[in-house]
Image (cartoon, helix red, strand yellow):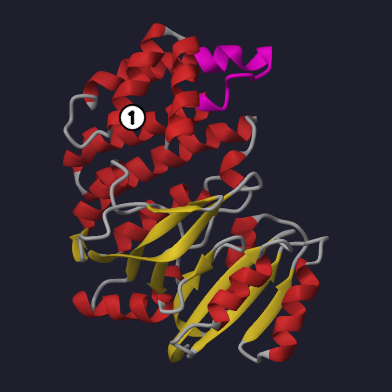
Amino acid sequence: MKPGLISVIVPFYNSGEYIKRCVESILAQDYTNFELLMIDDGSTDAGSGICRAFSQADPRVRVFRQENKGQSAARNLGLDHAEGEYVAFVDSDDYIESGYLSYMLALFGARPESLFTMCNHYVVRGKKALPASDTSAGVRVLSKRDAFEEVLFHGCVDVSPWGKLYRRSVFETLRFPEGRVFEDTYLFGDILLKSEYAVFGSSCRYFYVIHEGSTVRREYSEKNLQYVEAAKQLASAALKCDASLRTGAVRRINHARLSVLRYMQSCPRRYRPARSALRRQVLSDAPEYIDCPKTPRRDRVAVKLLKLGFIPFYAGWYLYNKIR
């Protein structure tokens, strides 16, 4: 481990259209004591060559290649080779502001014993970039319990590996679960359990790009059901922290069920029983959290529409996606 060094890990797979912008934003950082580990997850497009060119021009850039094993395996390979005291993840189709690393590092000053810091981010859709949460909140020091509550109710804390700066010690005993989707939701509870505090900065320094190729925009498959299992893992970790978080834990699991249901509108007939089962589970558990002041309004609306049936529910999702 090299003191002060930040290991920036970027897994990529066929990201040739976006990878140049991503890498250039990292190399433009005003904090220069970093290494950039590009993890090629078996790409077949121009992205591999672009990254090799960067590595030849800048000694801080190292490229590692593996057969296509998925994002978790790529991140884990990066962790195996990281030499820094700190670790940051950036997705290959995203990019960061030039002061991102220095800002994230400075946030540790608010609570030096914290194991990771987080920042607000822009959600980029086409030409629009909107803050994910309130930009006027300043710097917040969150206890472990408060951080869990924020993530259970989709507050300022999210499960994404990106948008955070970790002390390397976080990953001494933890790795991303391979062969799974929604691996970030599955792992994040274990990360929170390790740290008594987390520091959040409301300034937007990370640009999270949503486009048609994004992981979150895939069509329904049986793997989508792993989101419910991942949410249960997160909820279980929260309850280990504090049993009083049960309302939020139930809400987060139900949110996962609602999210899976949104992709099942045109699912094949063989999945219809599973869809009906998810609906019953949502409606059965909703009374436990629906009147909680922290429950987002969109959850309340979604549950009400689902009570009326699948047609109103999917009409509501259509309108929500149009106006957000």
Which quadrant of the figure has residue 80? bottom right
Element type at mark 1: helix
Looking at the image, residue 304 sits to the left or right of residue 69; the answer is left
The local crowd at label 1, few if under 14, some if 14 to 19, many if 20 or more residues have their Cα within 10 Å, is few
Residue hosting label 1: 298
What x and y, as percent, mark residue 35? Answer: 56, 84
Q: Which is the main secondary structure of the residues drawn in magenta?
A: helix
Q: Going 32% across and 69% down the picture, which residue do you hit? A: 117
What x and y, as percent, mark residue 299? Answer: 33, 28
Q: Is residue 71 above or below residue 285?
A: below
Q: Is residue 52 within the magenta segment?
A: no
Q: Is residue 274 within the magenta segment?
A: yes
Q: Going 20% across and 53% down the picture, which residue do you hit? A: 146
Q: Going 68% across and 17% down the picture, which residue do you hit? A: 268
Which quadrant of the figure has residue 199? bottom left
Q: Is residue 98 above or below residue 43?
A: below
Looking at the image, residue 322 sits to the left or right of residue 205; the answer is right
What x and y, as percent, mark residue 10? Answer: 60, 69
Which quadrant of the figure has residue 218? top right
Furthest residue to the front? 127
Q: Is residue 27 visible?
A: yes
Q: Is residue 81 visible?
A: no
Look at the image and give the residue range highlighted in magenta. Answer: 262-276
Q: Is residue 132 above or below residue 272?
A: below
Q: Amino acid at mark 1?
A: Arg
Image quarter (top left, top right, bottom left or bottom right) of the C terminus: top left
Question: Who is closer to the viewer here, 86 or 209?
Answer: 209
Q: How many marks?
A: 1
Looking at the image, residue 78 sits to the left or right of residue 2; the answer is right
Furthest residue to the top? 308
What x and y, as percent, mark residue 100? Answer: 42, 75
